[in-house]
Image (cartoon, rainbow, N blue to C red):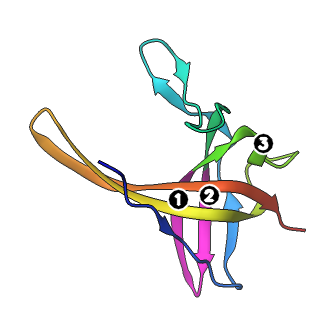
Amino acid sequence: MAMTRIRVGLLPSAVCMTGTDATPKIKDPQTGEIATDRETGEHLFTVTVMLMEEGRAEVMKLTVPQSGLPDGLKPGVMVRPVDLFATPWARIFNGQLSEGIAYRAGRLEAVK
């Protein structure tokens, strides 16, 4: 079953600030295997950002390929996600439904 990918358009006034360092996205916690892009094989990282738009703020966890991370990325840096997509997901684990939205950006641009 193909997952639905929805392009996310941010307002020009939107500001994102990183809340964490980029950390490797773990595919298998038991082996420590790092997740890779299905098409390019590139390692994937996760970065938590605070998205501030029109007086509201949301914390988002973004998945970004290694080549899409700007130099000097650390908490508190202003960034703009490029090619941002949302993928709704749901799974049943131990009889409980859990669901959410996975966010993936092609790259993060440092905002000067």
Nearer mark to the viewer, of 3 and 2: 3
* Labelled disc at residue 49: 2
Q: Which circle's residue, 3 or 1, is located before the other in the chain?
A: 1
- Highlighted magenta segment, given as a residue range: 48-62
Q: Which circle's residue, 3 or 2, is located before the other in the chain?
A: 2
Marks 3/2 in contact by CB < 8 Å: the verdict is no
Amino acid type of the residue that numbered disc 1 sits on in the rendered structure? Met
The residue singled out by tag 1 in the image is 60
The reply to whether residue 77 is visible in this rendering is no
The residue singled out by tag 3 in the image is 67
Position of residue 8 relative to residue 53, above or below, is above
> Residue 8, image x and y in percent?
54, 72
Q: Which circle's residue, 1 or 2, is located before the other in the chain?
A: 2
Reply yes or no: does residue 53 show up in magenta.
yes
Q: Is residue 69 left or right of residue 1?
A: right
Residue at 53% from the left image edge and 18% from the top image edge: 33
The reply to whether residue 71 is visible in this rendering is yes
- Label 1, secondary structure: give it: strand
Residue at 61% from the left image edge and 75% from the top image edge: 52
> Residue 98, image x and y in percent?
23, 48
Position of residue 84 relative to residue 9, above or below, is above
Residue density around tag 1, few if under 14, some if 14–19, many if 20 or more, within 10 Å: some
Q: CA distance from mark 3 to mark 2?
A: 18 Å
Q: CA distance from mark 3 to mark 1?
A: 20 Å
